[in-house]
Amino acid sequence: MRPLLEVRNVSRYFGGVKANQDVSFSVVAGSLLKQIGPNGAGKTTLFNCITGFYPPSKGEIVFDGQRINGFPPDKVCKLGMARTWQKVRPLAKLTVLENAVVGALCRTASVSRAKGIALEQLRVVGLEKRAEVLAGGLPIGERKKLELARVLATMPRMILLDEVMGGLNARESDEIIQLILDVKKRGLTQVVIEHDMKAIVRTCDRIVVLSSGEKLAEGTPQEIVNDPRVMAAYLGDSGGAKA
């Protein structure tokens, strides 16, 4: 089966600073890949390269067989790849529904059709009863769910989730884990940056480990948990065992 996403020898430099160096991996359609690594490993920078916010300095990003280097984020989204952000910033003065409608307008010029799509995704994340609440008043757990609903409303083929459980308590994290699993059952391809090792083992098919901007390891959750190089990378991080 041809991969839906291929990252081929991607490097990204900022002046003389190396953020990513010669990173390669692929993601099969319908699978869930976790991207982990110590703080400053280059995880979000790689997400930015994949989704068009930064062009790679070297290498190729291939989505569904098409090279997308240099494509702007809106074009990448219309091709079927959408992402969340580590720091969620809803459109605070719009309602929850209106925020989700913004995502749906990627797919249709009809506001009524966009509202239908948005409501469907709010139901997926459990926010349908909060549809008329101003997004700026939501607690962090619901903001994370809204961010996911807005991404799903773009009707993507692949989503990239950047620390979607960051800042959540145990109950809220469990709810997000369940949402990720529910989305996976629907066949949507996912690439997820995550800190919570319990969540990583529970939800993903494969893991790519970054360290100092380079790919340190790749494998199944069990292979990664037992890889001494991964353990050394985490123990050497001043933040402890964070991805």
Image: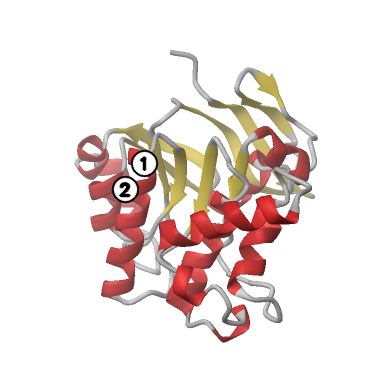
Which amino acid type is marked by label 1?
A: Lys
Task: Please report the residue visible at 53 percent of the width from the left and 66 percent of the height from the top.
Answer: 146
Percent from the top left, x then y, of residue 203?
Answer: 29, 46
Identify the secondary structure beneath mark 2: helix
| Displayed quadrant of residue 29 | top left
Picture quarter with the N terminus: top left
Which numbered tag is attached to residue 117?
Answer: none
Label 2: how many Cα within 10 Å (few below 14, some 14–19, many 20+): some
Vertical relation: 76 (above or below) 28: below
132 sits to left or right of 210: right
Q: Residue 184, which numbered label? A: 1
131 relative position to 15: left or right: left
Q: How far is the residue under mark 1 from the one under mark 2?
A: 5 Å
Q: Nearer the viewer, residue 84 or 195?
A: 84
Neighbours of disc 1 within 10 Å: few (<14), some (14-19), many (20+): some
Q: Check disc 2 and report the residue beneath it.
A: 181
At horizontal 68% and vertical 27% (from top left) the residue drawn is: 59
Which residue is farthest top?
A: 1
- Residue 238 or 123: which is nearer the viewer? 123
User: Residue at image x 64%, y 76%?
Assistant: 95
Query: For residue 207, what is the image quadrant?
Result: top left
Image quadrant occupied by the C terminus: bottom left
Residue lying furthest front in this view? 112
Residue 20 position, x and y percent, is: 61, 42
Percent of width and height locating residue 61: 65, 29
Question: Would you say the residues marked 1 and 2 are in contact, meaning their CB atoms lie under 8 Å apart?
Answer: yes
Q: For this view, does 19 lie left or right of residue 145? A: right
Regarding residue 42, the answer to whether it shows in the image is no
